[in-house]
Image (cartoon, grey):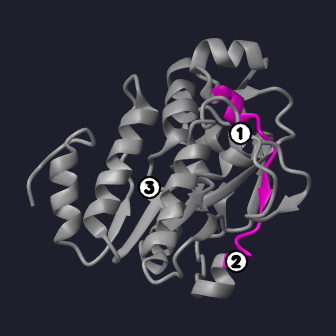
Amino acid sequence: MSPGALTDTDVLREAARRADGVIHLGVDYAEGTADVDRGAAEALQDGAGSRPYVHTGGVWVYGDADGVVDEDAPLRPPRITAWRLEKEKRVLARAATGGRPVVVMPGLVYGRSGGLVQSFFVEPGRAAGAVPCIGDGSNHWALVHVDDIAALFVLALNAPAGSVYAGVSGQNIPLADVTRALSHAAGCPGSLDSLTLDEAVQRMGPIAEAFVLDQQFTGARARRELGWTPTRLDALAELAQD
């Protein structure tokens, strides 16, 4: 397989053409993310043809949730993910023309000392001696361990065309509890730096608006239709050790 970036659409198309199935996990955080991802997805789907294509979305597109919700909840994305709506419609539209698109929407992924919690909470907390907590921390995060979401992506290769799955393990935990756990991982147990949303946006950028979403999700559809069985279900204990 030839190396290439997400902007190398010829490379992506040819690689997908030779594959039995495609899982698109890549992201380019440079300027023009939406256009880059749209071009990459189209090239990968062109190459995949009628073979499975699994696309990465995210539950943040649902915005604040009213209680525990599923994939049919209203879409109210924060600005950082608003661009995904039209793109994912285009991805799923290929089901009507012979493609086999599936969208997996992970919750907040944690585990193996990586991900957004490491970059935006643990590492700054380690440097400052206190982990940031936005607002009063009463909003919920819909969490999923990296090993469990990886298993879902594999299962999704055999899902019906046009399917959408929330990749959440049923752990809907208040941010205050999450940040307290992360303070142990950062080496400053119990030390939190309380930020207003405006302060958090200044420090973290627009992603802070996503961190304050109140989201409680069920992954029942993936369990029911694909037999997905998350096994890493003690998020607070694992986050404290990351």
Q: Looking at numbered disc 2 in the image, what kind of residue is underneath it?
A: Arg
Q: Nearer the viewer, residue 41 or 113?
A: 41
- At a point 86% along the width and 30% down the height, the residue shown is 136
**In the picture, residue 205 is in which quadrant?**
top right
Q: CA distance from mark 1 to mark 2?
A: 21 Å
State the residue in front, 120 or 82. Answer: 82
For badge 3, the amino acid type reads Arg
Q: Can you identify the residue that label 1 sits on? A: 77
Pointer 3 residue: 112
Q: Which residue matches tag 2? A: 221
Location of residue 32 in the rendering, given as x and y in whole percent from the top left corner: 41, 26
Q: Nearer the viewer, mark 3 or mark 2?
A: 2
Which sits in the foreground, 192 or 159? Answer: 159
Q: Which residues, given as a range, are shown in magenta? A: 208-221
- Residue 101 lies left or right of residue 227; in this view the side is left
Give the SS element for disc 3. loop
Q: Amino acid at mark 1?
A: Pro
| Image mark for residue 183 | none
Image quadrant occupied by the N terminus:
bottom left
Q: Residue furthest right?
A: 67
